[in-house]
Image (cartoon, rainbow, N blue to C red):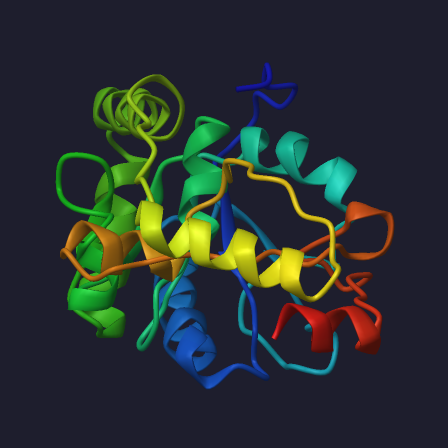
């Protein structure tokens, strides 16, 4: 994690994605509105989408889409991050935890495969439950330090790879060779849905196709259509 520069007040990060229903934008706003009522000295930063068109009842910094090079510094400055997800897996908590930022989120099987009471704040998906969990953590310096340390252990110190199925790896290599395509075997430092399948005993393999300038999971991500077709 990076050293913190800010010393005044508490700073809460909210992954703001009003265009993505699974991210629970409205629920998060209701929860943070209550946090601001109970702790008016708290600062908020919203990132992930432009929130300037929304009339929110608490002061906030509208960070929008933050450049990749600035994310680690932003995460490290925050005392807590609220990241909601109601369907598939969310990997953003891993980034935040690796930067020493404790994560708060909603309960659900798609969340609790990764986050639990030992490494995060997990609450029922209601404004009351989420706001209460956030307020409790913001007022508990010791617990925040514990969760920050646990997050670093999970993402950096104790992180172990999940192996793919050797015969599927070889099948991909053979298919690439027969199509006249080059390929390399490489580990991935990110989390993927595939790791959950592999951990459950489902034969699993992954194919990566190159993105322009190596940018992935970013607004600037781009893959050439021909390369996408080859990857399929």
- The residue at 21%/27% (across/down) is 143
Query: Is residue 196 in sight in this rendering?
Result: yes
Please tell me which residue lies in front, 39 or 232.
232
Q: Is residue 88 left or right of residue 182?
A: left
Q: Position of residue 191 (x, y in %)?
A: 42, 47
- Looking at the rendering, in which quadrant would you find the C terminus? bottom right
User: Residue 193's image quarter?
Assistant: bottom left
Residue shown at the point (32%, 58%) measured from the top left: 204
Q: Residue at x 57, y 63 (%)?
A: 175
Q: How many marks?
A: 0
Residue 107: which quarter of the image? bottom left
- The image quarter in which residue 51 lies: bottom right
Say whether residue 59 is visible: no
Decide: is 164 above or below 137: below
The image position of residue 112, as x and y in percent, is 18, 56
Nearest the viewer among 38 and 91 is 91
Question: Is 127 placed left or right of 90 in the picture?
Answer: left
Left or right of residue 137, residue 97 in this image: right
Measured from the top left, where is residue 48 in percent x and y? 64, 63
Q: Residue furthest front?
A: 178
**What's the residue at 16%, 46% (across, down)?**
116
* Image coordinates for residue 176, horizontal then vertical, percent: 63, 59
The one nearer the camera, 140 or 39, is 140
């Amino acid at each position: 994690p990076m050293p913190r520069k800010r010393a005044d007040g508490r700073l809460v990060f909210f992954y703001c994605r009003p265009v993505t229903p699974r991210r629970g934008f409205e629920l998060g706003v209701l929860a943070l509105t209550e946090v601001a009522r109970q702790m008016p000295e708290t600062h908020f930063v919203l990132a992930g989408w432009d929130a300037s068109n929304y009339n929110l009842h608490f002061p906030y910094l509208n960070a929008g889409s933050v450049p990749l090079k600035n994310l680690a510094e932003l995460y490290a400055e925050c005392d807590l991050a609220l990241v909601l997800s109601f369907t598939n897996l969310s990997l953003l908590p891993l980034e935040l935890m690796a930067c020493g930022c404790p994560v708060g989120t909603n309960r659900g099987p798609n969340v609790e495969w990764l986050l639990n009471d030992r490494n995060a704040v997990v609450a029922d998906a209601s404004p009351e439950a989420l706001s209460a969990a956030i307020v409790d953590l913001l007022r508990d310096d010791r617990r925040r330090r514990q969760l920050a340390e646990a997050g670093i252990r999970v993402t950096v110190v104790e992180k172990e790879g999940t192996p793919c199925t050797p015969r599927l790896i070889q099948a991909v290599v053979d298919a690439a060779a027969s199509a006249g395509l080059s390929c390399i075997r490489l580990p991935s430092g990110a989390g993927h849905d595939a790791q959950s399948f592999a951990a459950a005993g489902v034969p699993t393999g992954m194919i990566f196709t190159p993105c322009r300038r190596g940018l992935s999971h970013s607004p600037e991500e781009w893959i050439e259509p021909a390369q996408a077709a080859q990857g399929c």
